[in-house]
Amino acid sequence: MAQIIDGKLIAQQTRAEIAEEVAQLKTQGITPGLAVVIVGENPASQVYVRNKHKACGEVGIYSEVIAMPEQTTEEELLAKIDELNGSTEIDGILVQLPLPTHINEEHVLNAIKPDKDVDAFHPINTGKIMIGNPDFLPCTPAGVMVMLQKSGIDVCGKNCVVVGRSNIVGKPMAMLLLAANGTVTVCHSRTKDLASVTREADILVVAIGRADFITGDMIKEGAVVIDVGMNRREDGKLTGDVDFASASERAGYITPVPGGVGPMTITMLLRNTLTASALHHKR
Ligand code: GUN
């Protein structure tokens, strides 16, 4: 049976470290600040935004939620971002995705000042990740790297297989594993004979958004299996992209859903807000 990587516990420990750093900064008169912008009323986004705001409060980071109506124009949103770019209280800006379809996501993400881009979605930041000189690490892949480190799993020289090639998870995940000296393969919906590739993985990271898609027979005995998926089953239960029951029979380490990668994502957003604050106070 696989050893469980407890994301909730690792997130708690990391948030305690962050809270201490924030307390230290406050003795110097510095309070890191995050603005979270949400446009419209997507219920899942509302939950995520509430959780981000709450997590900031718990570690002592100042946060503002800016809720704008569904019919907000791109111009109005860009004006708000411009205002936040110039604010001295705000170190980090996050625009919750997805945006309403009449707003061009790329225009909006590109408008965030790169040194306030705590999601690391701006092309300057994705480029810096690509060349191995990042200011901010994208939250979910960075959370996965912390989970590996804190579980004593060394990436160097390992066969790492990433299933999924999104800009938010798959692509930056591959870059971080590569930076840690893994041998990295990226798979996607057009990959031929996926199981023959995943079975070679010492470290398998799955982010495809298909419930219980990776089954035990696709996993090498003793592999590390990281499940980034978050899917709602018909019975209302939350499940990942990995079939936990069969996978945990084969894997050496596995992350559960819920309680795996999820809690780490917001934790890394808090970490990035501290990084942004440090960038702004260095000047
Ligand atoms: N929507 C789903 N995941 C994310 C994320 O990591 N950042 C933002 N801004 N929106 C999201």
Image: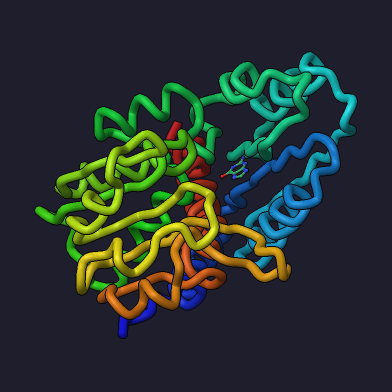
Q: Position of residue 124 (x, y in %)?
A: 42, 22
Q: Is residue 178 left or right of residue 15?
A: left
Query: Which residue shows up at 38% across the image and 58% down it?
Result: 144
Q: Please say if 62 is above or below 113.
A: below
Q: Please say if 204 is above or below 93.
A: below
33 or 7: nearer the viewer? 7
* Colouring scheme applied when the structure was drawn: rainbow
94 or 98: nearer the viewer? 98
Q: Residue furthest left?
A: 157
Q: Residue furthest bottom?
A: 1
- The picture quadrant for ligand 1 comes to top right
Q: Is residue 155 left or right of residue 35?
A: left
Q: Residue furthest front?
A: 193
Query: Which residue shows up at 49% across the image and 39% down it?
Result: 168
> Does residue 16 appear in the picture of this structure?
no
Query: Which residue shows up at 27% across the image and 45% down it?
Result: 193
In this rendering, the count of numbered labels is: 0
Q: Please say if 215 is above or below 165.
A: below
Q: Position of residue 277 (x, y in %)?
A: 52, 43
> Does residue 98 appear in the picture of this structure?
yes
**Where's the C terminus, which quadrant?**
top left
Query: Which residue shows up at 51% across the image and 74% down it?
Result: 8
Q: Is residue 164 left or right of residue 39?
A: left
Q: Position of residue 100 (x, y in %)?
A: 77, 29
**Where's the N terminus, which quadrant?**
bottom left
Q: Position of residue 233 (x, y in %)?
A: 66, 64
Residue 87 figure quarter: top right
Residue 104 figure quarter: top right
Residue 2 figure quarter: bottom left
